[in-house]
Image (cartoon, rainbow, N blue to C red):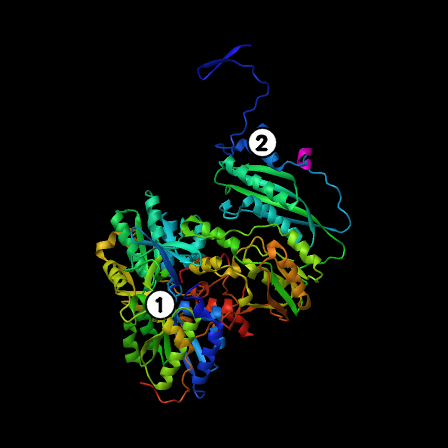
Amino acid sequence: MPPTTLMGVTRMVEPRKNYLRPLDLKHGHVDMAHGAGGRAMAQLIDELFARHLGNEWLAQGDDGAVLPAPGAGRLVMATDSHVVSPLFFPGGDIGCLAVHGTINDVAVMGAQPLWLSAAFILEEGLPLADLARIVASMATAARQAGVPIVTGDTKVVERGKGDGVFITTTGVGLVPPGRELSGSRAQPGDAILVSGTLGDHGMAIMAGRENLGFESPIVSDTAALHGLIADLLASGGDIHVLRDPTRGGLATTLNEIARQSGVGMMLQEKALPISPPVAAACEFLGLDPLYVANEGKLVAICPQNDAEKVLTAMRGHPLGACAAVIGTVHHDPQRFVQMTTAFGGKRMVDWLTGDQLPRIC
Amino acid sequence: MKYLAEFRDGEVAKKLAAAIAREVNPERRYRFMEFCGGHTHAISRYGVADLLPENVRMIHGPGCPVCVLPIGRIDQAIQLALEEGVILCTYGDCLRVPASGGLSLLKAKAQGGDIRMIYSCADAVTLARQNPDKQVVFFAIGFETTTPPTAVAIKQAAALGLSNFSVLCCHVLTPPAIASIMEGVDEQLQLDGFVGPAHVSTIIGSRPYEPFATQYRKPVVIAGFEPLDVLQAIRMLIRQVNDGRAEVENEFSRAVDRDGNRKAQALMDEVFELRESFEWRGLGTLPHSARRLRAEFAGFDAERRFALAYRPVADQKGCDCGEILRGIKRPQECKLFGTVCTPENPIGSCMVSSEGACAAHYTYGRYKDG
Amino acid sequence: MCLAIPAQVVELREGDNAVVDLAGVRKEISLSLVDDVAVGDYVIVHVGYALNKLDPEEAAKTLALFAELGQQAGDSPRH
């Protein structure tokens, strides 16, 4: 055995064959080699991604995951890209957000979510510790939801060309025969329900922005809703529309549905569930909670007679504890969403224009 | 939320609305102008007009600093960002106002201008400290509510000896704008009284409005910011009109008195002086209606530091912002309203600012237009 | 033109600064424009500065005024 000298210390060491120094997950950074398709990339996948996300499909190690054809029914596929900044915020991170968001998009179609894919665009210089944290969070979210990530991809872009990391998730699910959920099915006379408090996610992000200087107890509501949705659908109520309001807030989602269904809506401001800290943060910044993003809430539209049943089903689930009936659908060729204010007057709840910006006036 | 929720109570609103309905003289019309854009926004957002009798009408006034900011001033801010390479700090309200060349501050940002939205002018001073090798300019707009904070920021910068901080000062005054409106009353515009601004009045007090009541014989009631405040102020105006009085009354007594905030006034006077004249969008050029930095603080004046020229720019053809700001026309009467000019594609500033008459009507009230 | 909200002072900090609280949301603001502010006082906050203190007695008086039944139109003027 030849002696080797390392840092002034001479040892008798058996040189190991094919030795690969492990990734420095504490202090290392993503570099261009990690996206080049070679050994460095394989190592990243092996020591970081697979370590957290490991399952039988990823272990197949092929370009695509081979999955069993699901049973009777129709397939639903949904995709979402996530570019949130900051990457870590009170209540979550870009990783679990990406998992929950796509599960929800599949589930609101009435489908049982089956599998997810995840594609990452990493910016050169992203700390590996952050990436590990994000991937671990995704793994936990996927595991708790019971929806595995079966295939993925990683690319690296030069410093300055990405915001740390962008994640795109795609989900596939199965809608049982006979179930028809669509944004075009709202009818005059229907009741409009929401599953809980509005604006939590958007204000958690805002309040977390350093330059606004707030301290708040607001936490993102990011959550997988397929369990709540299953309860809803099992309630016996005839659900016409299910949607999860995300960017642009409840107002945007309702305007979309109104347009799709060719109807108008009348909301009751007093019935809107909004937590006091979210209301307060909106006051400080001059924002309207109706337009602030959510990531773990549902809008459900059903016939008036079924509203009670559906509400009870929602409130029976932990994610629907603050569910409420907030308005009704009516005939309106102009497809306006309107609201009776808590003050007693009326106003429109119009489409959002651009991004809602904090104002001084 | 204390001092907010009680002043928005719908049950109290019903009773107050019923009281107003009893007190109006059914034989006449009442036309009141709410001067302040914040009140315009509150009226639209809460649907206050729905609680008023048919013969009481609210007319939107020009108290929206974004709406009265001339295009030429936004051009100056854009020039600083794109040509001088400064870090341009602005309140969110200004970002989408259309300026010359199809630009806005937001579009200039997309073109590479370092334009940062801030919540407080103190943040601009912080940015200057954090970026000693760059010039930081704060785009200062607003009436007397927003002016004292700018004065504090400038003094702070002076105390810190910052050489890379300056202010593009477009602060304007409320009384000259009210005077300008009052001049046009009875010729072009029927007005029976004014709802005076809430937070401007906490700074300047109620005294500055007294000459208007005496000279023009129109009642002024200073109203708080919440919808019940506005309703109550309207009730007080109706009473004055019925009684034949023209006085200054203060509904916002919990935050406003006759003298105002002396400390804030002194700070403003220390840092700023009045410009001889200033161009306002819609109101024309008004004398002694805007501020600039005094000689002692000239080092922080961005117009001087960067030798900025002011170039007046006319409103787009067809844009009725001017007459809407003066209450002569309603948003629906502008040919561009809702067709070419929408919040997505605003032609004039009345559509950009969330408290501009056009934006407020489009966003909250256009369902009434049929 | 002036989005300002009433918030309660919960902490005084050095250099004319203070922390206000509104329904659990806390923000550091400047008291440079107002004198004699104590913890517990309510102030009107605009762009990170307190503009004025809020007078609780006057607030109560105003609320009482809202509830006033009022006069009919045509009643003789009260001077």
Between A337 and A72, the residue placed more toward the observer is A72
- Quadrant in the picture for the N terminus of chain A: top right
**To which residue does mark 2 refer?**
A47
**In the depicted structure, whether residue A192 falls above or below residue C29:** below
Q: Badge 1, how many Cα within 10 Å: few under 14, some, many 20+? A: some
Between C15 and A332, the residue placed more toward the observer is C15
Between disc 2 and disc 1, the foreground one is: 1
Between A246 and C62, the residue placed more toward the observer is C62
**In the depicted structure, whether residue A9 falls above or below residue C26:** above
Numbered tag placed on residue A84 in the rendering: none
Which residue reaches farthest right? A72
User: Where is residue B61 drawn, in percent x and y?
Assistant: 39, 72
Amino acid type assigned to the residue bearing label 2 in the image: Glu
Numbered tag placed on residue C56 in the rendering: 1
Between B87 and A13, the residue placed more toward the observer is A13
Q: Which quarter of the picture shows residue C45?
A: bottom left
Q: Which quarter of the picture shows residue C42?
A: bottom left
- SS assignment at label 2: helix
Q: Badge 2, how many Cα within 10 Å: few under 14, some, many 20+? A: some
User: Where is residue A19 drawn, in percent x and y?
Assistant: 57, 21
| Left or right of residue A131, residue A360 in this image | left
